[in-house]
Amino acid sequence: MKNKLFSEIPHMTGEKIEIRALAQSDAQSLRKLTDDAETYRFLPSFLFEKKYENPKEVIRRLYDECIEGLLILGIFKGGDFCGLAELYDYRGDIRRVSAGIRLMSGFRGSGIAVQALELIEEYLRSETEIETIAASSMSENKASAAALKKCGFIMTNHKSPEDWGCGAPVPTDKWIKRICCRG
């Protein structure tokens, strides 16, 4: 029997990166990420890691408040914090979850987003009953579109207006990937 999506906090290890729960020792790196305006240029304004001013408080509350329908994990390369991987909008009734990646400036463009999405897909396929992964990206975010395409996601909506907490609707592209089918 496969696990429910959020019955445990996964630890995923690939050839070049690791995705794991954030620890208090990651607070300084998390602060550096959340303070990077360039990283959040293409992201909603209401993300959990920005909910509390103190990054230690974010980490302390993260796995108590989020484990049922939202899971945020750190992405690391060679022990260095690169950014966050998020699984959210879990819909058990239709076996779907959404995924998102946010990387610090120095790690973008190096293939880490693609590697992270591949590890997440591998985990979901082998450890859960998820059949579909969804993703959203701002239409102007060409790097995210390229990573999603490289991982086999298909765009289902282009420039769909969505409330990302930015004061006005944001043109958003919607993506989907089927990872398994019921027999």
Image: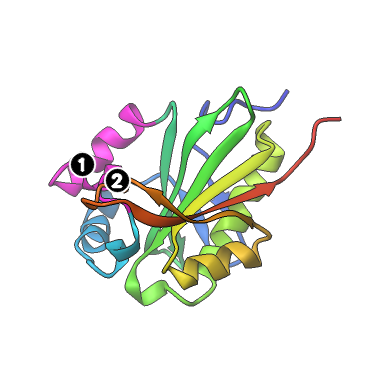
- The picture places residue 166, in percent across and down from the top left corner, at 24, 52
- The picture places residue 169, in percent across and down from the top left corner, at 31, 51
Above or below, 174 against 149 in this view is above
| Front one among 40 and 63 | 40
* Residue type marked 2: Leu
The residue singled out by tag 2 in the image is 47
Q: What range is drawn magenta here?
A: 44-66
Q: Main secondary structure of the magenta part?
A: helix
- Around disc 1, counting alpha carbons within 10 Å, would you say few (fewer than 14), some (14 to 19), or many (20 or more)? few
| Front one among 16 and 38 | 38
In the figure, is residue 112 to the left or right of 171? right
In the figure, is residue 49 to the left or right of 155? left
* Residue type marked 1: Lys
- The picture places residue 103, in percent across and down from the top left corner, at 39, 64
Local SS, label 1: loop
Q: CA distance from mark 1 to mark 2?
A: 7 Å
Above or below, 73 against 141 in this view is above
Q: Quadrant of the N terminus?
A: top right
Residue 155's image quarter? Answer: bottom right
- The picture places residue 161, in percent across and down from the top left corner, at 40, 51
The residue singled out by tag 1 in the image is 51
| Front one among 74 and 85 | 85
The question of residue 159 being in magenta is answered with: no
In the figure, is residue 96 to the left or right of 152? left
Extreme-left residue of the structure: 53
Q: Residue at x 35, y 33 (%)?
A: 63
Q: Are marks 1 and 2 in contact (CB under 8 Å)?
A: yes
The question of residue 62 being in magenta is answered with: yes
Q: Residue at x 72, y 45 (%)?
A: 179
Above or below, 106 against 14 in this view is below
Q: Residue at x 49, y 65 (%)?
A: 144
